[in-house]
Amino acid sequence: MTTIVVVDDETLITDFLTFFLEDAGYIVHAARNGVDALELILRVLPDAVITDYMMPAMSGLELARAMKADRTLAHIPVILSSAAQGAAARAHPDLFAAILDKPYAAAKLLQTLALVTAARGGESGAAS
């Protein structure tokens, strides 16, 4: 099964994404900021990370940089999900496997997850 870490400081978003992605067959872990997410990512070594851009303690950009700087985590694709900072994030294509501008269709998220996990040699989707 494919494991995903979802990072957002808005509980409604992490709750929705957790429910939605688990329903699609993924194993999902959630964190409310980049600092907690980095600890969680080191612990579970997910197949992909979906993060918001603007968060307290550590932004999505800082989280992606920290992951790329760690050999253990550098291979994990990071999907940025942002309402306002997509343009700023696009200036860092080396950090993000994909950028989703909020609001986005749920099908677009599933398609993006399948693409980024398949691109790194992982499973092409959720549970078989």
Image (cartoon, helix red, strand yellow):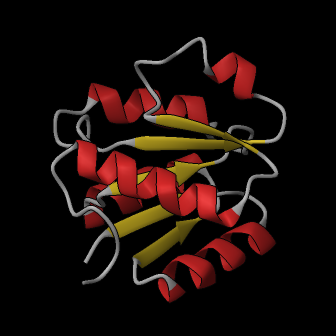
In terms of image quadrants, where is residue 7? bottom right
Residue 94 in the figure: left or right of residue 128: right
- Residue depicted at x 25% and y 51%: 118
Q: Is residue 45 above or below residue 54?
A: below
Q: Which corner quadrant holds the C terminus?
A: bottom left
Q: Is residue 73 left or right of residue 126?
A: left
Image quarter where the N terminus lies is: bottom left
Where residue 50 sits: x, y (%)?
53, 53
Q: Is residue 81 among what the camera can see?
A: yes
Q: Is residue 7 visible?
A: no
Image quadrant in which you'd find residue 57: top right
> Residue visible at 75% across and 52% down?
104
Residue at x 25%, y 34% (from the top left corner): 74
Report the number of discs. 0
Name the spot of residue 37 as percent of width and height, x first: 48, 55
Q: Residue furthest top?
A: 91
Front in this rendered view, residue 16 or 7? 16
Q: Up-down: is 58 above or below 94?
A: below
The residue positioned 29% from the left and 58% from the top of the image is: 47
Q: Between residues 11 and 119, which one lies in front from this camera angle?
A: 119
Residue 14 locus on image (x, y percent): 67, 70
